[in-house]
Amino acid sequence: MAKRSETLMAPSTGAPSTGAPSTGARTARVQSRGAGLTITLISLLVLLALAALGGGLSMIMDPSGAALGLDENVEYLPLFDDYLVPGVLLIILQGLVPLLLAFGLTTGFRVPLLGWAESLSGYRWPLIGTNLLGGGVVAWIGVQFWAFPAPAVAQFVILAIGVAIVVLAAMPSVRERYRIK
């Protein structure tokens, strides 16, 4: 019986291969993994935005915070008498900004004004913004844990989303996807 050759043919070129995955196959796996992680990252940005838009609208419609059960915590707001301004800030910073970042990650939309940040970091603006947003969410929830006497379940959920955004945005396959080439 003839011995079977251990040499495999590379599918794209027909050239002999040693059996190790080709660079193209590795790249395809990284791109596939990066696509899945990117979809998860975009989904978390949209989830954060929806939560912030809902919470911010509730704060604007009822600045006392009673609708969200925050009325006891209003005394811990050092700069504001009620939740109107925090509601507006929540809508802008954690509602609209994540939607803009998700749009940028999805479409590759270019913002010439942010070219300096891209050339400085080597990455597209939505990834830079996503890193900043995730870190900002984690820091802001940390401030809330420090400032308010009894953290709410929603704060733990938003903290988990913020941490997940930071981790996913730092994954090599996601970073490679948005690297300026």
Image (cartoon, grey):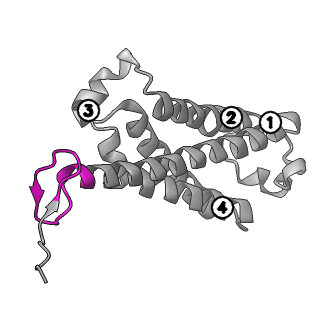
- Identified by mark 1, the residue type is Leu
Sooner in the amino-acid sequence: mark 4 or mark 1: 1
Can residue 21 be found in the magenta stretch? yes
Crowd rating for badge 2 (residues with CA inside 10 Å; few <14, some 14–19, many 20+): many
| Residue 52 at least partly seen | yes
- Farthest front residue in view: 1
Q: Nearer the viewer, residue 77 or 66?
A: 66
Residue 152 visible to the viewer? no
Check disc 3 and report its element: helix, strand or loop.
loop
Disc 2 to disc 4, C-alpha distance: 18 Å
Which residue is label 2 attached to? 91
Using the rendered view, name the quadrant where residue 168 is placed.
Answer: bottom left
Q: Secondary structure at mark 4?
A: helix
Residue at image location 30% in from the left, 29% down from the top: 117
- Looking at the image, do the residues carrying marks 2 and 1 touch, with CB atoms under 8 Å apart? yes
The magenta segment is 9-26
| Residue 161 in the image, given as x and y percentages of width and height | 58, 56
Residue position marked by numbered label 4 in the rendering? 157
Which residue in the protein does label 3 denote?
Answer: 180
Disc 3 marks a residue whose amino acid type is Ile
* Three-letter code, disc 2: Ile
The reply to whether dot 4 and dot 1 touch (C-beta < 8 Å) is no
